[in-house]
Image: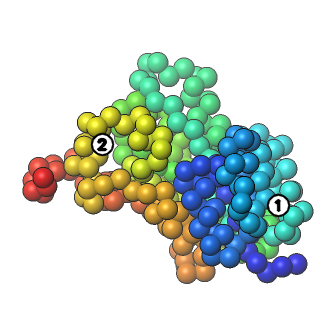
Amino acid sequence: MSTTPVAIVTGAARGIGLATAKRFLGAGWRVAMVDRDVPELDSAAAGLSPVLALPYDVSVPEQVDAMVADTLAEWGRIDALVNNAGVADFGPIEETTFARWRTVMETNLDGVFLCSQACIPALRESRGAIVNIASISGLRASTLRVAYGTSKAAVMHLTKQQAVELGEYGIRANCVCPGPVRTKLAMAVHSQAIIDAYHDAIPLNRYGSEDEIASVIAFLCSGDASYVTGQIIAADGGFEATAIGLPALRGND
C-alpha cells in the first residue's frame, strides 16, 4: 500500500472545499472529492490528479458508507477527513419551519457526525486528523441565522467530543470557523452596504479568501499540527475578537 497520504474533502465542488482539495494536491496528497452536485463536481475535478470524484450526499448514511468504501478500495487508506459540506438557510425564527431547520441540520451537523464516525477505523490505522468546518456564525449570533448558526455551534462542540474520545487512537480533531470569505456567492448576494459594514467591523478590513481558509485546514491535517487537537480556530480577520467593534474608534477611513 502506498504511503502517500489520502484526504477526503466533502463539499469539494466549489469554494473552500475545492480550494482545500487543491491545497492537498499541491502538498502531494491524494484527494477524494465528495459532493452531491454531480455536474459541478465533475467540472471541478476535471484536470486535477490524483483525485477520486465521489457523488455522494453526506446526510445519507448509506452514501457515507459508500464514500469511505470507495476511497479505501481506490487507495487503501484515509489520513484526513475535512467535513466541509454545508447548506445555508437564512430567515427569521418565526419563518423557519421545521422542514427548513432539518434541511440545515441534516447536512451541517448530521453529515459531520456520519462522515467522522464512518472514517474512524481508517483514521485509527493512520493516526489521522478530522477538521470540521463551522462558521463565525457559530461563535457569534447574528440575525436570520437560527438554524445555520445553531448547526455550526453544534459542530464546534462535536469537534471537542471527537478530540476527547478519539485522542487515545491518535486521531486529532479540530474545527475551523471562517469569517466573511470572498466567494462568488457572497459577492453576488452582499450589497455594497454589507461589504462596507464587514470592512469596518473586521480588524484586517477585508474579506478572507478561500485559499486562506484552505491553508489553515491543510495545516491542521499536517504533521506540523501533530500536538493540536480539540481547538476551535476562527479564520476571520479578527472579526470574532471585536465584539461590538466600534470601528470608528480605530480611525479607519
Q: On the picture, is 134 further left or further right than 35?
A: left
How many numbered marks have been drawn onto this rendered protein structure? Answer: 2
Q: Which percent across, then down, holds residue 214?
A: 53, 63
| Place of residue 141 in the rendered image (x, y in percent of width and height, measured from the top left) | 37, 40
**Amino acid type, label 1:** Thr
Circle 1: element type: helix
Residue 169 in sight from this viewpoint: no
Badge 1 density bin: few <14, some 14–19, many ≥20, Cα 10 Å: many
Q: Is residue 104 above or below residue 70?
A: above
Above-or-below relation of 150 to 64? above
Q: Is residue 245 left or right of residue 15?
A: left
x, y (%) of residue 191? Answer: 32, 34
Query: Looking at this view, is 72 or 211 the one in front?
Result: 211
Q: Which mark is residue 195?
A: 2
Residue nearest the viewer, comparing 19 with 90: 19
Looking at the image, tell me whether mark 1 or mark 2 is earlier in sequence order: 1
Which residue is under mark 1? 71
Residue 233, image quadrant: bottom left
Left or right side of 51 for 131:
left
User: Residue 125's spot in the image, x, y percent?
Assistant: 79, 73
Question: Front-most of 181 and 187?
Answer: 187
Q: Residue at x 60, y 80 (%)?
A: 223
Kind of element beneath mark 2: helix
Q: Amino acid at mark 2?
A: Ile
- The residue under the point 65% across, 49% down is 13
